Image: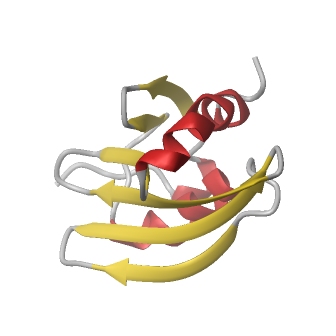
């Protein structure tokens, strides 16, 4: 079995904006034990993010959170999937899609 990088050393390496979500990549592989620290690593870049619900699954984990940004309230879901090593952030409704560009900027480190 391949050795996984400890979660304490995983960092966001890239963020891509899609039409209805953001794809987030880390600089190493993650496992189920990494969901909590990776969630914290993502949300640390978003001021005022508040976790509303953790939804665990066998190989997938979802975190619903709210965020106030530029005077707008938004609701989002941060998704992790172990087998595909995928992480994506999706808006809960079309009204939050307008905020994705700003979230992309914040998660990319403001660059």
Q: How many marks?
A: 0
Q: Is residue 36 above or below residue 99?
A: below
Percent position of residue 43, x then y = 67, 57
Q: Residue at x 45, y 81 (%)?
A: 54
Q: Picture coordinates of residue 51 (x, y %)?
A: 62, 76
* Residue extending farthest front: 95
Along the line of sight, the residue nearer the viewer: 44 or 1: 44
**For this rendering, which residue is in front, 72 or 42?**
72
Residue at 75%, 17% (x, y): give it. Answer: 111
For this view, does 35 lie left or right of residue 48?
left
Image coords of residue 93 (percent x, y): 42, 55
Q: Residue at x 33, y 62 (%)?
A: 31
Q: Is residue 93 above or below residue 13?
A: below
> Image height check: is 69 above or below 74?
above
The N terminus: image quadrant? bottom left
Residue 65 placement: quadrant: bottom right
- Applied colour scheme: secondary structure
Q: Which residue is at the far top?
A: 111
> Is 103 located above or below residue 42 in the figure?
above
Residue at the image position 72 percent from the left and 35 percent from the top: 106
The quadrant in which residue 110 appears is top right
Considering depth in this image, is 40 or 76 the residue closer to the camera? 76
């Amino acid at each position: 079995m391949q050795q996984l990088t400890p979660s304490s050393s995983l960092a966001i390496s890239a963020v891509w904006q899609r039409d209805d979500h953001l794809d987030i990549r880390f600089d190493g592989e993650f496992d189920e034990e990494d969901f909590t620290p990776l969630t914290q690593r993502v949300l640390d870049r978003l001021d005022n993010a508040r976790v509303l619900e953790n939804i665990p699954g066998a190989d997938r984990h979802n975190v619903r959170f709210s965020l106030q940004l530029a005077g707008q309230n938004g609701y989002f879901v941060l998704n992790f999937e172990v087998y595909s090593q995928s992480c994506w952030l999706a808006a809960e409704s079309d009204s939050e899609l307008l905020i994705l560009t700003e979230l992309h900027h914040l998660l990319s480190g403001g660059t």
